[in-house]
Image (cartoon, coloured by chain):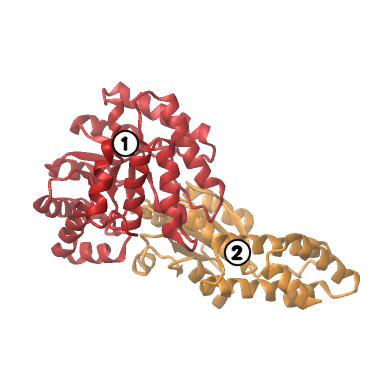
Amino acid sequence: MCRVLIIGELINGSRTVVKQAVVEHDETVIRDLAVQQVEAGADYIDVNISVGQGDKEAEDMVWAIKLIEEVTTVPLAVDSANLQVMEAGLRARKNTVLVNSVSAEKHRMEPFLDLCAEYNAAAAALPIKDSGIPPAPEERLEICQLLAEKARDRNIPVENMYFDPLVLPLGVDTYNSYAAIETIKKLKKTIPGVKTTAGISNVSYGLPGRKLLNQVFLVLCMQAGLDGAILDPTDQGLMAAVKTTEVLLNKDKMCMNYLQAYRKGLLNN
Amino acid sequence: MYQKISLAVQEGEIEEVDQLTIKSLEKGNDPLDVLNNALMSGIEIVGQKFADGELFIPEVMMCAQALQAGIDRLNPFLKQDENPHRAKIVIGTVANDVHDLGKNLVKMMLTANGYEVIDMGVNVSAEEFAGAVRGHNPDVVGMSALITTTMLEMSKTIEYIKTQGLHNGSLKILVGGAPVTEKFAKEIGADLYADDAIEAARILREIL
């Protein structure tokens, strides 16, 4: 019955506008991106400030989090592969928080899960091990099961673990989108109470007609049991697809959200 | 005939390239000539069309496979010193990093430009890179990193290749990946930096 959790992806150091804002400490850009995403319906704001200035990253993370918390109380997804940066972010924030992300890579699994337990944080968990990303859904499920077990050892509630099936570009191999959808199905079937999340726009990388691909992919993932999506909430067409799918999957009693979106003119896309 | 082969490469017609290459050899054409004036001229157009946004990744992958089918046919007929490839490249994603999309795109573009690419995969340690340089004796070793933390592995790997005495003579070190900048590449002692796969092919074509 739950709505899909929207994790707004726009504050990411790999985007030129954000990269520049982080390097120049432009406060307005970060604040505006947070506000725009909240207004568009984001339930979480992802914060990734990795722009390749190594030793300054922890400082930059704290800087960005403080700015975002000035304008919103929406939960944050602290996004870093660096343990020190992650910890600095978890310590600095006041809002509810999600660790983005944990994986089964040796240097990452235990320390990141320890942080989740220590700071009572939810986590996005990726089926990546030292040898890479296995293509087969069965193997991805196995890694997720290992991560779930390690989380249980630390008394992290299963509903705080958002497993990401890993979405790789369709253009490189058409098996990739199928593998992601199958992994979601297997996760929901095998680990009771587990949550799932996925980065939607990866699927269309390098192909024309990206918006439509993203929309249809999102619908297929939701049908497979997706609980959260990392996406651009200001993409009106994509958000319209979310709301329409929610009502069709009986996740929007009496069509309330759907009708509200209609009145706001958000479905005309 | 050459035009037909070139077109078949551009259309990614694997079987057709294979058959036409056989026919061309049967007619007595010089294998090296077929390589340069049919297969390579076709793939060059593919690379250009991809750079112009006219062709997309899956199409380029098909074309690269078609090119390979032709090269495989020609190979037994080429003389020892007639290497069918423009140059040899060892490529991989550095230690503790398992992102391979960018690396695979570079591999695709280089293959599509007639380079022989030896792919070491992901999470490749400094020792493994050095071993591959020793074993394959490539013209270029290319490293990819997608996380800011693993960019530092690039620095370590370059350092290691240098201390092993392998960065001598003609070996060039190429780096790239989303967080990598030209400035960073210079700082860690790389010879070449590319912003994306298309750029990587363009830069290598200037020197090899």
Tint applied to chain A in the drawing? red
Q: Where is the C terminus of chain A found, in terms of image quarters?
A: bottom left
Chain depicted in orange: B
Q: In this view, does A248 lie above or below B42?
A: above
Residue appearing at x 86%, y 75% in the figure: B29
Residue appearing at x 25%, y 44% in the figure: A257
Q: In this view, does B62 lie above or below A183?
A: below
Chain letter, disc 2 residue: B
Q: List x then y, in percent, for residue A24.
A: 19, 67
Q: Is residue A229 visible?
A: yes
Residue hosting label 1: A251
Q: In this view, does B141 lie to the left or right of A102?
A: right
Q: Nearer the viewer, residue B74 or A241?
A: A241
Q: Nearer the viewer, residue B53 or A268?
A: A268
Number of on-image labels: 2
Residue hosting label 2: B60
Q: In this view, does A179 lie above or below B11?
A: above
Q: Is residue B166 visible?
A: no
Q: Which of A201 and B125 is in front in this view?
A: A201
Residue B138 numbered tag: none
The amino acid marked with disc number 1 is Lys
Q: Where is the N terminus of chain A found, in terms of image quarters?
A: top left
Chain letter, disc 1 residue: A
Q: List x then y, in percent, for residue A58.
A: 20, 50
Q: List x then y, in percent, for residue B88.
A: 62, 64
